[in-house]
Image: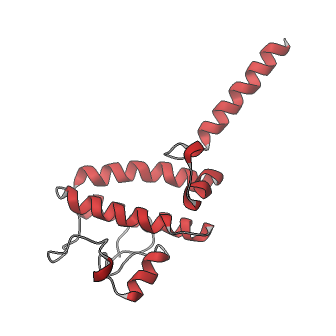
Amino acid sequence: MKKIITALALASIGVASLAHSASFDCSKARSFAEKTICSSPKLSKDDDDLKYLYGYAKASVKDRKAFSEIARALWNSRERCSDYACVEEWYDSAFAIYGAIKAKGIPATNGVTDFAKESEISPNEKKMKAKAIIPKKIFPSMTRKRGQLQ
C-alpha cells in the first residue's frame, strides 16, 4: 500500500511540473530571463503560448531572413532583461509583434531589413530596446496588447 501511495505521489509531481513548464528545458536555463521564466507560472505559460504564436507568424511570412532578424532582435532584447517587469514587458511586446506579423505580415522596411544593426539605431531607440519596448521605427502602429494593432 505504501508503494502505491508513493508511486501516486511521484506521478502527481510529474503532472504538476508539466503544468508549469516553459517552451525550453529549464534545467539548462542560464540567463536571468530564462531562470525568471522557469520560476514563474505566468511567464512559463506566456512562453508556451508565445511558442505557438511564433510558429504561426513564421509560417505566414515569405521573407524568412527578415523574420529571423526580427526574432533575433527580440531574443537579444529579452536576454538584456535584469528584472521580472522587463521580462513581463518583453512578452507583451513579443506577443504584439508576432501577432501583427501573423495578421499582416512584416512591415515595409524601405529596404532596411537588418533590425539588429546597432549603428542604425538612435540612442533613444536603444533605450527602448533595452527595456523591451516595441521599436516604433519598425512597428509604428502597435499597442502593448498581445498581438493587436491600433
Query: Which residue lies most toward the right here?
Result: 2
Quadrant where the image shows the N terminus: top right
Q: How many marks?
A: 0
Q: Can the viewer see residue 21 in this picture?
A: no
Judged left or right of residue 40, residue 150 is left
**Residue 34, position as x, y percentages in the image:** 55, 55
Q: Quadrant of the C terminus?
A: bottom left
| Nearer to me, 26 or 148 | 26
Residue appearing at x 56%, y 50% in the figure: 29
Q: Position of residue 73 (x, y in %)?
A: 36, 67
Say left or right for 83 vs 130. right
Residue 51 is left or right of residue 31, and the answer is left
Q: Is residue 5 above or below residue 56?
A: above
* Nearer to the camera, 116 or 37: 116
> Which residue occupies the foreground of this view, 109 or 140?
109
Q: How is the image coloured?
A: secondary structure
x, y percentage for residue 30? 56, 53
Task: Give how far across and how far down residue 18 sits, in percent.
Answer: 59, 37
Near-viewer residue (148 or 86): 86
Q: Looking at the image, can residue 117 be seen? A: yes
Residue 68 occupies which quadrant of the picture?
bottom left
Residue drawn at (59%, 43%) of the image: 27
Give the residue at x 64% y 54%. 40
The answer to whether 128 is drawn above or below residue 92 in the figure is below
